[in-house]
Image (tube, grey):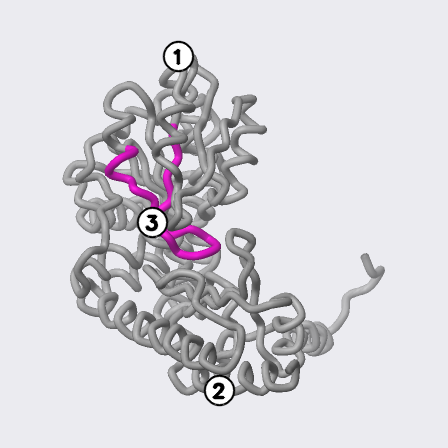
Amino acid sequence: MNDRRIPLSDIRKELEHYLSMETAFSDGRVLGSMCTAPHPLAVEAHRMFIESNLGNPGLYPGSVEMEGRVMEMLAKLLNGPGCSGLMVGGGTEANITALWVAKKLQKKREVIFSSNAHFSIKKAIDLLNLDGVEVGLDDRYRISIDEVEDAVTDETLAMVGVAGTTELGMIDPIDRLSDLAAENYFLHVDGAFGGFVIPFLRQIREGVPKFDLSLKGVNSISLDPHKMGLSTIPSGALMLRDMEYLEGISVDSPYLTSSRNMSLAGTRCSAAVASTYAVMRHLGNEGYIEVVRRCMAITDRLAEGIEELGREHDIEVAIKPVLNIVAARIPDHVAVKEELERKGWYLSVSRHPEALRLVVMPHITMERAEELLSDLETVLNARR
């Protein structure tokens, strides 16, 4: 720390310097991230509640009421009338909390999850001193139900399904997992990505599977409003079939305005609650449908363009996109990614299968998608 104060103007210049080093979603060239530029209203709401702390609820009744309203909207979105939950710091915290809840409900140790589950599941298993049972994938890169059935033992505590896998955007057969879990096992659904896509996509496309609380075996669902929900970072939510689940993880908090704390975090960001509340109220079902419709149109165009390139190059779509993620099989895909990055694109790769991964978030435009396809063709031609 410096000994003397530095003028505000100098600090602002420093901040501008560091900001200039950051990658901006507004450029429309980031297709490797599941986050996006928040809605302007979300940013405004975040600033308004920047000093509020939902972790000390007695001082911030407005934050408490907004959280309740968000939970009501999410319960409706997820077909869980009467269900509720809480805002958290993102999908990782939601997944950890869900398995913590499960551990308190039953004195068992084994958690069944697949190789396409988010890395936070492994974090949760380690932190909670549980035993992870990793199973493989089916031919559509979803959790293998056959392997899940084989993995169940007397020590099975929970199963984890994913609604919108990080690598490919696949939706695990949550209905089958729900049947398996029934009343015997805790079923957590990681919907961090798909939670703000699938409910709206189901209204405009046929064949999109259920993943929500209408399936009786589902006990909890995580969602990330800071992804396709267009809230500010970090904004997460954990929906629970029964709020009494939280009693098992509650602790005394005598120096706060509530006597019990029922979340992993003590301090909780009211600004994220306000941001999520504002954008959900503003966009409504109609607005989110349009966001999803546009993202899927661009996704379809990228997939179509990759197939067109496949007529002359060794490239193909690994699997037909279900959500707004495209995976392209390309020989030496890592090198292709690096060459595209030199042209100003920010991309990523998947492991299962090995492919170039393109995530189509709301900051991507059709024009940018066409530019990417053109640059990809240039790179492929140069590699002949």
On screen, residue 311 versus residue 176, left or right, reads right
Q: CA distance from mark 1 to mark 3?
A: 27 Å
Q: Which residue is mark 3?
A: 171
Q: State the residue at coordinates (41%, 68%).
A: 38
* Three-letter residue code for mark 3: Ile
Q: Is residue 366 above or below residue 303?
A: below
Asked if the residue under mark 2 is in contact with the one under mark 3, i.e. CB atoms within 8 Å, the reply is: no
Query: Callout 1: 10 Å neighbours few (<14), some, many (20+)?
Result: few
Mark 1: which amino acid?
A: Asp
- Of 325 and 15, nearer the camera is 325
**Label 1 residue SS:** loop
Residue under pointer 1: 154
The tag earlier along the polypeptide, 2 or 1, is 1
**First to last magenta residue range:** 159-177
Q: Which residue is mark 2?
A: 371
Q: Residue at x 21, y 44 (%)?
A: 75
**Residue 246's quadrant in the figure?**
top left
- Residue 99 x, y percent position in the rendering: 43, 29
Q: Is any atom of residue 224 visible in this view? A: no
- Front-most of 320 and 82? 320
Return the x and y of residue 323 as percentages of the image width and height: 34, 61
Mark 1 and mark 3 lie on one chain; the one further toward the N terminus is 1
Where is 49 relative to 120, above or below?
A: below
Determine which quarter of the picture holds residue 260.
top left
Can residue 63 be seen here? The reply is yes
Give the quarter of the figure containing the C terminus: bottom right
